[in-house]
Amino acid sequence: MLKFLIQRSFSGVLVLLGVVVVIFILLNIIPVNAEQMSLGENADEATVLAVKKKLRLNHSPGMRLWYYLSDLSPLSIQSHSDSEAPLYLDNGDYQYATVLKFASKSLVLKQPYFGRSFQSGKPVWEILSKKMLPTTILALTAISLASIIGIALGLVAALNYGKFLDRGLVAFSVLGISIPSYFSALLLAIIFGYYLSSYTHLNITGPLIDVSDIGEYFINWRNLILPTIALGIRPVAIILQLTRNSMLDVLRADYVRTAKSKGLSNRVVILKHALRNALNPVVTSITGWFAALLAGAFFVEYIFDFKGLGHETVHALTMFDFPLVMGAVLIIAASFVFVNILVDILYSYLDPRIKIDG
């Protein structure tokens, strides 16, 4: 197990490194005057130069990429004597512990640093960490409801194979797969948040963490309903088809016929023997879809003004706030890597035939 975790973690680091390099190159192709974005049009030349130095814009793209990778690395060599150095340790950006100290540099163990926003000048992690909770709650709620509904409908379809109900559910799943999440979000917002709002009492837009009239923060669960449905439609359709097809294969297996021949009731055979073994590929899909929903929530959040990680990222793109965009993409990529490792471990426990070497 330890060997497996080390190998997969190393592969994950390589994936994240590739993501950082590709996104950095793509974003640096676009000509953006970041110092003017931070200060406005009327800033004097001395202030502009100071901001360029703070954001490391006075260095070549290759050197900026190297500094960014060094900032992200939990173990790096930083300067502790030259306050003009780009990787100066005591500039207020790093939280670190010194491992080894040399004449002018130190080997430090530190919290990864994502840079500062072009727009607000605040640390990227400080901004994004506040937006991760609504997005995580949205993704967890959507995948939980999608799993329950999808498995239930897939089981019903398999038990009614070839009948009208089965064909209807298959047609529903095809329709659900075909409709993009952002289009579902627009339809739901217009129909239930606008035209039928007097009956549903749902808002067309609104954040999960809202502010009351007296300035107190509270969780507005009502604003979670429409984004959850919009995000959950496609996973429901996928899980429905996976459960149905897997159940049809399992119901033809010899051990199911043996269980029936022993006089076990259909309920016990289906729930204890058939469904339990049919869920292996479904669970794998569910865990993978959770990571996908974190990324798929971007435009859905923007449509519903949900004020989560996706909303913040789309807003940063429109404002060319590249450090925020890179930070958000890196967080999503890291979640994919983590979930994939978790899926492999979980699958080995669900299916005894799968063994993790090491």
Image (cartoon, rainbow, N blue to C red):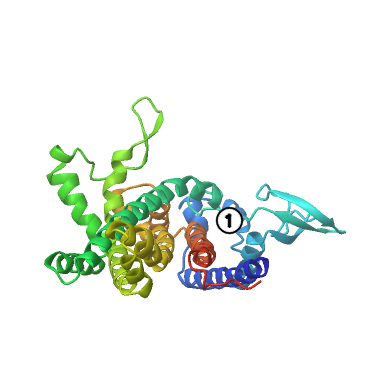
Residue at the front extreme of this rendering: 262
Q: Picture coordinates of residue 267 (x, y %)?
A: 29, 57
Report the amino acid beneath label 1: Gly
Where residue 87 sits, quadrant-wise, is: bottom right
Residue 256 appears in the rendering: yes
Kindly identify the residue that appears in the image at 13 percent across and 44 percent down: 196
Residue in the image at 17% along x and 47% along y:
192
Please rate how many residues cluster around mark 1, counting C-alpha atoms within 10 Å: few if below 14, some from 14 to 19, many from 20. Answer: many
Q: Quadrant of the N terminus?
A: bottom right
Vertical position of residue 139 compared to residue 67: above or below: above
* Residue 283 place in picture, x, y as percent: 41, 63
**Residue that sits furthest to the top in the current view:** 214
Q: Which residue occupies the foreground of this view, 310 or 202? A: 202
**Is residue 233 positioned above or below 254 on the image?**
above
Looking at the image, which residue is at 35% across and 62% down? Answer: 275
Of residues 277 and 50, the one nearer the viewer is 277
Q: Is residue 267 left or right of residue 87?
A: left
Reading the image, the residue beneath label 1 is 115
Q: Secondary structure at mark 1?
A: loop
Quarter of the image with the C terminus in it: bottom right
Tell me which corner region of the image, top left, top right, bottom left or bottom right, holds residue 13.
Answer: bottom right
Report x, y in % for residue 287: 44, 61
Number of numbered tags placed on the structure image: 1
Could one spot residue 179 in this view of the protein?
Answer: no
- Whether residue 202 sits left or right of residue 319 in the image: it is left
Q: Residue at x 24, y 67 (%)?
A: 158
Of residues 208 and 98, which is closer to you in this image? 208
In the picture as drawn, the residue positioned furthest to the right comes out as 103
Lateral position of residue 55 relative to residue 157, left or right: right
Say left or right for 242 vs 33.
left
